[in-house]
Amino acid sequence: MTKGQDVRDPKHDVLFEPVQIGPITARNRFFQVPHCSGMGYRDPRAEAAMRRVKAEGGWAVVCTEQVEIHPTSDITPFIELRIWNDEDLPALERIATAIHDGGALAGIELAHNGMNSPNLTTREPPLGPVNLPVATWSHDPVQARAMTKSDIADLRRWHRDAVRRSLAAGYDLVYVYAGHALSGIQYFLSPRYNTRTDEYGGSVRNRARLLRELLADTREVAAGKAAVACRITVDELIGDVGITRAEIEEIVGDLAELPDLWDFVLGSWEEDSVTSRFGPEAGQEPYVRGLKSLTTKPVVGVGRFTSPDTMARQIREGILDLIGAARPSIADPFLPRKIEQGQVEDIRECIGCNICVSGDFTMSPIRCTQNPAMGEEFRRGWHPERIRPRQSSARILIVGAGPAGLEAARALGHRGYEVVLTEASRELGGRAAAESRLPGLHAWKRVVEYREQQLRRMPSVEVYLQSRMSAGDILEYGFDHVAVATGASWRRDGVGRWHTHPIPAEAPPQVLTPDDLLAGQRPTGSRVLIFDDDHYYLGGVLAELLAAEGYQVRFVTPAASVSDWTANTLELVKIRQRLMRAGIRVEPNRTVVRLERTGAVTGCVFTGEEEPAEADAVVLVTARLPDDGLYTELQARKPEWGQGGISSVHAIGDAWAPATIAAAVWAGRRYAEELDAPASGEPVPFRREMTALATGPDDGPPRSG
């Protein structure tokens, strides 16, 4: 962060007013709402370090992800926190202490996931308002058992015990979770799931009875020692079948003063964390506006807020009392500090890609396209705003100004090294700049804009456009270290996951790659077949692009769904909806067998049954090859390095191994972090959480919870 002359904009002053939340006071209006981390019970020290950095960055309240309160709330394979019994307290205490050490209040989101809990680890029968299959993404072959009055009493007792343990662990704010179609309480609230005929079903008031009881129980146990928050879905967005805005107004009006804080979320998790491709900043405002008038208690909401002006307007217009954020706090943990110190230009704005969400779905530590330090705070000791100073007077040449090259130059410049960044084209950004011109991906340009703005303020970094470098040039210029960040190119032969050898092609039609389309080339005829064996976002975006330009698009993929991997970014359903509405013919579970003059022959991935697919052009979205020719030539000329003073040559990002933009940015940061660092000699280059095994007998009876 820059220091000195920056002054906060007065119109943002409202964001730094304290807010009373029951017995606690938030020092400003920035509230990191609960969000998953992919770390949970497996990596508590890593989670503690990550949350501490956010507290250090100025968030007044920093919360955990959902914390399972009982073995009947086991959402394996997802890795969340647990508070099943006292054995879970050391991990939770560590996280709360880290948040406090960073200067923030610590919140914990207690959750019984009800019908969203397949209980694959515990093997306990799931619990729900009625007998129904569990509501999981993976369609687990498990049914929830209709809860009896005794079960409800047990649930209330488990929740009270979890509140007591939360207080013992040092938390300042305790959640009652009733949102996102993930909470057992929401299944009671929703008429879609709750068809009970007793006092817990039927009318809105009856369906909200369990929520009322849990809130009252939580207040009683908290007894002024901690604030009580209620996170609730304000509209399921499925019509009268689910919870509607009118019902939520009745519930909030009835329970208005019971919690100390209302946290409003929208629909399911997919709707609440919609990507920038499908929703704008502050997109939830129409659904939340007006609810604050139903209670005297403060309310928090989210909207992928990145603009301080938008945040301040939410407060001034009485929409929210606290600015909630998950993804913006991941992209820039220091967002509040930067606004407070008038350093708005230094904010790493969230691009809304949801690569952070994918950590939860892949059971891996959280990551971020904009913030490569996210998830690495404990493992590698990385910090989003600080980096160790340079260790030498070395000069570094970075060839290629895509995501990896830009981040390497920025981080090395931050360390104080003299850096020259060269780019063969007329613009910075590589694939990030090119893809940001595609439908719905405009926000992705922030990857480039943030780093370009930072580099302009670094006197030790020089940037040269339209400067293609040869191996001979590099060997002559006298750099100490060279990073080759020349990116990758899409294959034109169809090699990928399904075809590990080129697709047979005899007198094929026009064959294009994503690179061709990004460069402005278009099919010569009207009929286009897209073969997507990449399965992330790009195939679907290109189909959308061509359909909007009037082409007849046929989308063929060996996967069961369009853009199959985007299930991990909460986009799968929305992508399929958009393609269907665009009139695109989608053919899942099919592959291109061969290319012919009239188009292609496709085959069923299960039976091999073939059929012709007429097309004037075929777009192959399969695999990429690293553009590593320069790196390979430099390695071949290693005996000449000494003459030019070169100590090392590395390929980074897609030039080393094609992956996501997030991976390329991370690779750039890693190169900058490890330059001049002594070799550790360790086979594992990061710290891990290690389980300490007890030294007693292994066959004793289980401990009671």
Image (cartoon, helix red, strand yellow):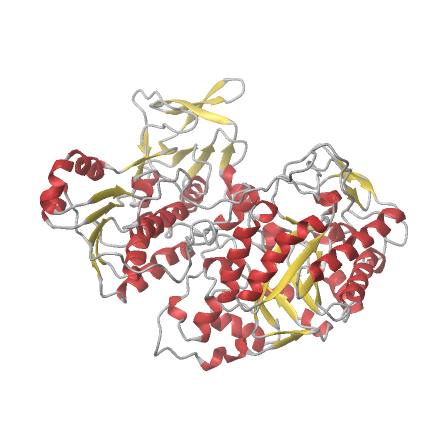
Side of 634 where 521 appears, left or right: right
Q: How many marks?
A: 0
Side of 389 where 564 appears, left or right: right
Q: Is residue 34 visible?
A: no
Residue at the location (57% across, 75% down)?
27
- Residue 594, by quadrant, is top left
Q: Residue 535's x, y, as percent?
A: 46, 36
Side of 365 where 150 appears, left or right: right
**In the foreground, 79 or 648:** 648
Residue at the location (70% across, 68% down)?
226
Q: Quadrant of the N terminus?
A: bottom left
Q: Is residue 170 above or below residue 548?
A: below
Q: Residue 147's x, y, as percent?
A: 84, 45
**In the foreground, 149 or 524:** 149
**In the foreground, 405 or 155:** 155
Residue at the location (50% across, 39% down)?
565
Q: Residue 255's x, y, as percent?
A: 79, 67
Q: Is residue 684 visible?
A: yes
Q: Residue furthest bottom?
A: 10
Q: Residue 592's x, y, as percent?
A: 42, 25
